[in-house]
Image (cartoon, rainbow, N blue to C red):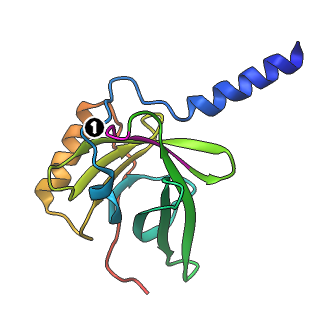
């Protein structure tokens, strides 16, 4: 019985990381082909896996099995080196909904929720399974103040705490 409870708890924890925060809706009409390619990280709520990184990009391409190859890359100026992580993403449900799960190691997945995406696929607002995760991504390394301000206003309206928001340096620092 203890083993059943342990397995049930593990499965709950693993699926709990692919959920969507309450009050957040993934975009519908998501077009995977248009989303593929390189995105620049403009702003984020910082986490240990990105701490100290600038010039951060995410590159998405298709794997042979239909999943999405993810390559995240950033420069750590303090260490004087590039950091790179390769993972894979899969849709949680329908492929026209911007809710994916991403893994960078083994069977452990985290939620990747696109909750705002402009019609031209030039800016995207992304969160994880809770509001501790937030990114503004763009097809260009810089955005206007208006774009950044609109992102902040929308994120605050959705309940994100922006006190720790970092605007990512995209200019070469090496």
Segment colored magenta: 95-102
Name the quarter where the N terminus is drawn: top right
In front: 102, or 173? 102
Give SS at disc 1: loop
Q: Residue at x 33, y 73 (%)?
A: 170
In front: 101, or 156? 101
- Residue 92 position in % (x across, y down): 47, 36
Q: Which residue is drawn at 31% across and 57% down?
A: 33
- Residue 91 position in % (x across, y down): 45, 41
Check the image and name the residue furthest to the left: 146
The correct choice, above or below, for 174 with respect to 160 in the image is below
Name the quarter where the C terminus is drawn: bottom left
* Side of 75 relative to 86 (left or right): left
In front: 153, or 114? 114
* Side of 145 relative to 160 (left or right): left
The correct choice, above or below, for 81 with respect to 61 in the image is below
Q: Residue at x 57, y 29 (%)?
A: 16
* Side of 48 relative to 5 (left or right): left
The correct choice, above or below, for 61 with respect to 25 in the image is below
The quadrant holding residue 2 is top right
Mark 1 neighbour density, 10 Å: few (under 14) some (14–19) many (20 or more): some
From the image, tell me which residue sits under label 1.
27
- Residue 108 position in % (x across, y down): 65, 44
Check the image and name the residue furthest to the bottom: 174
The quadrant holding residue 112 is top left
Q: Magenta stretch containing residue 120, yes or no?
A: no
Q: Magenta stretch containing residue 100, yes or no?
A: yes
């Amino acid at each position: 019985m203890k083993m059943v409870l342990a397995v049930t708890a593990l499965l709950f924890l693993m699926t709990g990381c692919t959920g969507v925060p309450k009050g957040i809706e993934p975009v519908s009409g998501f077009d995977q082909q248009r989303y593929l390619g390189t995105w620049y990280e403009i702003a984020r709520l910082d986490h240990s896996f990105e701490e100290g990184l600038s010039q951060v990009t995410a590159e998405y391409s298709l794997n042979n099995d239909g999943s999405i190859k993810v390559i995240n890359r950033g420069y750590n100026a303090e260490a004087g080196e590039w950091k790179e992580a390769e993972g894979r993403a899969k849709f949680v449900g329908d492929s026209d909904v911007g809710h994916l799960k991403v893994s960078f190691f083994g069977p452990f997945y985290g939620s990747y929720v696109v909750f705002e995406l402009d019609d031209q696929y030039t800016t995207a607002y992304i969160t994880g399974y809770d509001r501790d995760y937030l990114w503004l991504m763009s097809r260009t390394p810089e955005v206007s103040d208006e774009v950044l301000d609109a992102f902040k206003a929308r994120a605050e309206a959705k309940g994100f705490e922006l006190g720790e928001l970092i605007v990512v340096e995209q200019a070469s620092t090496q």
